[in-house]
Amino acid sequence: MGFSIYLYSVLSFSGLVIILAAGLMIAERFLINYGICKLDINAGEEPLEVEGGQTLLSSLYASEIFIPSACGGKGSCGHCKLTVTSGGGPVLPTETPYLTRKEVRSGTRLACQVKIREDIFVRIPADFLNVRMFSATVESTRVLTHDIKEIRFALDDDQEISQRPGQYVQVQAPSPDGPVFRAYSISSPVYEPKVVELVVRLIPGGIGSTFLHNLQVNDPVAFTGPYGEFYLNENPSTEIICVGGGCGMAPMKNIIYTIYDKWPDRSCWLFFGCRTTEDIFYLERFKELEKKHPNFHVVYALSDELKPGEKWDGETGFIHLAADKCLELDIPRQAFLCGPPPMIEAVTRILDEKGIRSEDIFYDEF
């Protein structure tokens, strides 16, 4: 009997707290009017005028300033970091898991969690200010493996995208809560400005990947971009190392084809990890590229044991072991990695042992 009373009291108190919190949210939304606030970007001479009460992220999107956000503004991805120099209010508990102490001290905030209640002053990287919204139609789709598709978009009208190899776009996909954006690396090379190609793995229940895998030729699609911090070294004497697995192929394909369009004799290695022979794709086309460019080296490795009757004459084991086996020490290099965190960590250790500086290693975890 005593336990039942205790449980009833706890539930009653919790319910009261929830009701009060909901009431405060409703009151703020409908009763508090913050009016028009000024949004000053990079100490601009003409601040934007935005409606108070909205999040900084939504206000920027409404002004066609597109900041990366993989979770649709729910505060669960940590991608929409900006520097707020004044007017952002205190850092919220929903932000702290994604911010280091140094970032908090420097004014870094999650744009989706900052409410505009007064004039606000922010700093936005110049690259973000160059991001655009693009409209396109599906040019082709191709099955690469049992769960990976290649999808090519042709940009509408006279649109062109100016991207660096290794950057990504955010595709707009429908959801029960309205349109959301999901990030995907661009696999088409920079010399195809009117095309954006993606390599997409189907994630069970994934909003973005389910939408993309169900697209048909001539379907419309919208996306923003380009985003990303990959910077390809322009010195042709610097060897390029690309390491990926699964849909981590996308930025690698972009980088490699961009390199051999501009520097036919440049040295480059591609290390690509697969679990089984069923996960292999693009190997034949890379082997053809290898024949044309003697300084291009392709290494695929299978991590699982072969099934009875299967044939494979390539590397076996995890892909970082193949990199360790093939790469010599102390050569000027730049590396690009794309794959799961354990792969990134293992490959980074190998590259460090080979003498590659940490600032010359770019990576994207998924």
Image (cartoon, grey):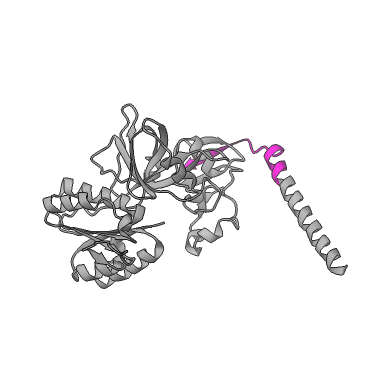
Quadrant of the rendering where the N terminus is positioned: bottom right
Residue 219 appears in which quarter of the rendering?
top left
Q: Is residue 245 above or below residue 71?
A: below
Image check: 321 left or right of 135? left
Quadrant of the rendering where the C terminus is positioned: bottom left
Q: Residue at x 45, y 50 (%)?
A: 203
Image check: 32 left or right of 221? right
Between 276 and 70, the one lying in front of the other is: 276
Q: Can residue 146 be found in the magenta stretch?
A: no
Query: Residue farthest to the front?
Result: 309
Q: Residue at x 59, y 40 (%)?
A: 54
Q: Residue at x 39, y 34 (%)?
A: 216
Between 55 and 255, the one lying in front of the other is: 255
Q: Is residue 348 above or below residue 153?
A: below
Query: Residue farthest to the right?
Result: 1
Q: Residue at x 31, y 51 (%)?
A: 251
Image check: 79 left or right of 246? right
Image coords of residue 18 (percent x, y): 74, 52
Image check: 260 left or right of 344? left
Image coords of residue 14 (percent x, y): 76, 57
Residue 30 appears in which quarter of the rendering?
top right
Query: Residue farthest to the top?
Result: 157
Q: Does residue 236 appear anywhere in the picture?
A: yes
Image coords of residue 247 (percent x, y): 35, 52
Between 292 and 43, the one lying in front of the other is: 292
Q: Which residues are magenta?
A: 25-41
Q: Does residue 355 appear anywhere in the picture?
A: no
Q: Can residue 27 be found in the magenta stretch?
A: yes
Image coords of residue 171 (percent x, y): 42, 41
